[in-house]
Image: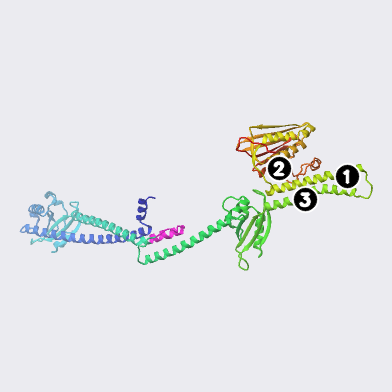
Amino acid sequence: MNAAGRRLDRLRPSASQLRRMGALAAVVGSVIAISGLFAERSLRARELDRAHSQLEARARLVRELVRGVDFVPAEMPRLDALADRAAEAAQARITLIAADGRVLGDSDVPFDRLAGVEGHGARPEVRAALAGETGSDARRSATVGRRLLYVAIPAQDPAGGAIRVADDLPHLEAAIADLRRMLAVAGAAGLAASLLLTYAVSWLTLRPLRELRGFTQALAAGNLDYRIPRRFRDELGGISRSIRDLAEQLRERVADATRGKERLRAVLDGMVEGVLVVDEHHTIVLANDRVAAFYGARGPLQGRSVLGALRDADLDELLGESQRSDDPVGRTLEVPHPKHRTLRVQAARFPAAPAPRLGTVAVLHDVTALARLETMRRDFVANASHELRTPLAAIRGFTEMLLGEGPIGEQQRRSHLAVIDRHARRLSALVDDLLELSRIESGELPLELQAVDVPALAAGLLRDCEARLRAKNLDAASEASGAAIAWADPQAVWQILSNLLDNAIKYTQAGGRIRIRVDEDGQRVSVAVEDDGTGIPERDLGRIFERFYRVDRARSRALGGTGLGLSIVKHLVQSQGGEISVESELGRGTLFRFSVPRSASPSGRLTD
């Protein structure tokens, strides 16, 4: 709304003003109506008196005019002529009446019709005049068909009679109508003036109340920056100052509460733990962003039930158990969706006993990584123990046989020593792989990053394995598109390719095919090692990079594997900022693909 609109809105009368203006208008209208009624009646009476006096005076003049003429039927022509002349002079109707009520002359009735005019002796004003008094009446004339005011006086004739003068009442009514119009105009002007005065007075009177109302409405709406002017010094001004002071205190307290709430929200949202506060009905009062992230919940959680918002019956049961107990309750929960997590939940009621329970606060720790590490640790211990047990048992058994008391032949002795040596070598290789994997995972393995010619390294590795390839009649080759210079550790890249190629040779049947493809892809060098060997079952694809995991354990051991090669490959790729993946189909071969950053140098030199 623009400034002009706001000014018009402030000037628009309020409901209170309209009520006051309406009440005053009713009072003023009533006063004007009553005053006008009395004024009209008074004017009407005064005008009638004035008209009566004027008509009586005219009647006396007519009586002087007809003095000496007898009011008898024989004088009718003369009396009628006198009535006509008197009417012209008096500007009124003149009627001359005999003592018996017979009309002897009338200015408004032609002479030839006078005989047909009924007697006027019964008329009120005539009856009074014939009785020697002045009479008057106002009515509609049956003779002339108009409303007239009649005044009759006794004639001076010895035989009696009456002289009647009449004038039209519309003259009087017109005067009264003019007065009525003037009263109406004056009343309307007075009413308008009173309304304007009422509006002005009420607007000035209600102005501080309107400002106080606007102020309180702003406070109710949360607008604590609203201000009211300090212009009033009366009682309303005192109330205004008190409310203003109250608003200042409220503003400061709300600001403090807001800052505290923001600090609490910042602390809660910055925590790696989830914080959940519920009331006694398990309705969420407070929850930070981590709780929503743990359960993949959308929308605000406040005001919703735990089951409705998080859909975790175990958590709801834990909160209920905490409400029934005075001691903290802890439990480990598994959250399957949207991502499998392991949460350690600690819940406690608040406030502490013996105060009545208001709700429960729970802290949710994401221990998924710890649980995974614990599982890996258990698996590692179990797998390492299993892998170490076989060579150790063989070495111990054959050593006991050699140390036995019975004689043993040279050939048998050499056979036993060969078995001991083979298992010792396997045990040594296993320990070496474990130590190397430990150094890679801990970041202790030094990496010397430099430009590496990956196609040349792949070709050299194939040459080193030429005897093994020829022994199994395998068709192996490397392909490269572009220079494919990587920024990596040459020894690490050689070890990655060596392990992948070694697995391809082991698990590809005689006469099979192996390909190494090196490509440049934007900022990375991609290497793929593909064979058409036995392949990997789909259920095992997600675990082949785990320590000691073997698809076919018996065959892997027979081929001399330790079960750590692919795990070492994965960690070497990741330690150089690369990625590795596998695709395979049982009986149709396997494709390993890894990538490392590309070198900015246009050429690389293989470092042996």
Q: Position of residue 100 (x, y in %)?
A: 13, 59
Q: Residue at x 46, y 63 (%)?
A: 250
- Point 69% across, 56% down: residue: 332
Disc sitting over residue 569 in the figure: 2
Q: Which residues are magenta?
A: 209-227
The quadrant holding residue 50 is bottom left
Please tell me which residue lies in front, 376 or 444: 444
In this view, the residue in front, 490 or 441, is 490
Q: Residues within 10 Å of mark 2 (few under 14, many from 20)?
A: many
Q: Which mark is residue 416?
A: 1
Residue 152: x %, y % from top left: 14, 59
Q: Are marks 2 and 3 in contact (CB under 8 Å)?
A: no
Q: Which amino acid type corresponds to the residue marked 2 in the rendered image?
A: Val
Question: Closer to the observer: label 3 or label 1?
Answer: 1
Q: Is residue 426 magenta?
A: no
Identify the mark nearer the N-term, 3 or 1.
3
457 versus 48 height, above or below: above
Secondary structure under badge 3?
A: helix
Q: Amino acid at mark 3?
A: Ala
Q: To which residue does mark 3 refer?
A: 382
Q: Position of residue 462 (x, y in %)?
A: 73, 34
- Residue for point 40% across, 61% down: 212
Query: Is label 2 or label 1 in front?
Result: 1
- At label 3, counting other C-alpha atoms closer than 10 Å, the crowd grade (few under 14, some 14-19, many 20 or more) is few
